[in-house]
Amino acid sequence: MKNQTLPFKGQCLCGQITYEVDQIEPDMGHCHCSMCRKFHGAAFATFGEAKAENFRFTKGADKLKVYEAENGTKRTFCENCGSSLLFEASDSTGKLVEFTLGTLESPIPLKPDAHIFTKFKAQWYEITDDLPQFDEGRE
Ligand SMILES: [Zn+2]
Ligand SMILES: [Zn+2]
């Protein structure tokens, strides 16, 4: 891909938190679960994955806040502007980081490859692309 420089860079809305990603793993899903919908205030949330050693915050790590839901999932966001930055499953080993694709600034060579948790999708939203759909997580 042209004009693609590494590492990929991202930041929250206010710019107080910045991060870099050296390599993005292939699983990149649109999550329609009700928690992602509420946390993002949107029809769905899109996450990329990176190995932990390939992801780092470069500025503003002290501005990160974590919300832990009753089911043990953790969502990391900017305490100043509220941007959603990371998702962590309750059974996460910490080897993979799930970050919000919407906060990336850099062009990337991959595209989202699936819709997940479509069983819970917003009734008012219709999926109109041909990506595979999973009722819950990927099998
Ligand atoms: Zn911010
Ligand atoms: Zn979700």
Image (cartoon, rainbow, N blue to C red):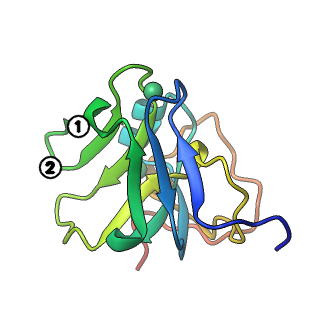
* Residue drawn at (27%, 74%) of the image: 95
Q: Residue furthest right?
A: 2
Density class for disc 1 (Cα within 10 Å; few <14, some 14-19, many ≥20) is: some
Q: Measured from the top left, where is residue 97 in percent x and y? A: 36, 63
Q: For residue 61, which quarter of the picture?
A: top left
The N terminus: image quadrant: bottom right
Q: Measured from the top left, where is residue 126 in percent x and y? A: 69, 45
Q: Residue furthest top?
A: 80
Foreground tag (2 vs 1): 1
Name the residue that disc number 2 marks. 72
Q: Measured from the top left, where is residue 71 in percent x and y? A: 16, 47
Q: Secondary structure at mark 1?
A: strand
| Amino acid type for the residue under numbered disc 1 | Val
Q: Measured from the top left, where is residue 38 in percent x and y? A: 41, 31
Name the residue that disc number 1 marks. 66
Q: For residue 70, which quarter of the picture?
A: top left
* Residue drawn at (38%, 19%) of the image: 80
